[in-house]
Amino acid sequence: MINLTLAEFEDKYYLHDSSIDKIDFDADKKILTLTIDFCFWMQNWYDATLPKNGLIAVTFENVSLYSYEDYDPTKFFGDRTPEILHTEISDDGTLILCTFEFVRYEPGEDLYPVMKIKADNVTVKNL
């Protein structure tokens, strides 16, 4: 397991074209866990501690803000998982914005919801 701040996570894990297989949020414990099908990209080719492909579990602890805008799973194509277009960190290093791409039934009506996560730290584990 690797423990990171939000800024370190955003810098180290370039998630473009990765997809989220599962989202678990425990509101009582303030823990958000994303199971991500991680794609290898050139930004992290040099770092031997990172997975090259495969599933990773990303756990955000002490989550004080979590929202998943514009997401209605009934409106999307089959069981397609959301694909991460990009992530970015806020200027103060306390908030991650993840932008996703879904494909709807209707052609040309792609939707780009944003997940907002504010947390104290992040743990990443290879599955």
Image (cartoon, rainbow, N blue to C red):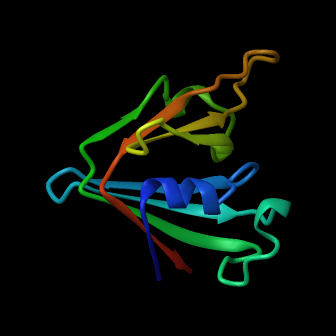
Q: In the rendered view, does 82 fall on the left or right side of 120?
A: right
Number of marks: 0
Work out whether residue 65 or residue 10 is closer to the camera in this orientation and state it: 10
Q: Residue at x 64, y 47 (%)?
A: 81
Q: Which quadrant of the rendered structure holds the C terminus?
A: bottom right
Q: Residue at x 85, y 62 (%)?
A: 42
Residue 55 locus on image (x, y percent): 63, 72
The residue most toward the right is: 42
* Quarter residue 106 falls in: top right
Q: Quick check: 52 above or below 118?
A: below
Residue 116's x, y, as percent? 43, 36
Residue at the far left in the pictured view:
28
Left or right: where does residue 104 sit relative to residue 43? left
Q: Is residue 67 above or below residue 15?
A: above
2 or 70: nearer the viewer: 2
Residue at 67%, 41% in the rendered image: 86
What residue sits 53% from the left and 60% below the top? Answer: 9
Instruction: Give residue 64's quadrant in the image.
Output: top left
Residue 39 shown left or right of residue 69 in the figure = right
Q: Is 31 located above or below residue 3 in the figure?
A: above
Residue 103 in percent (x, y) is at: 72, 30
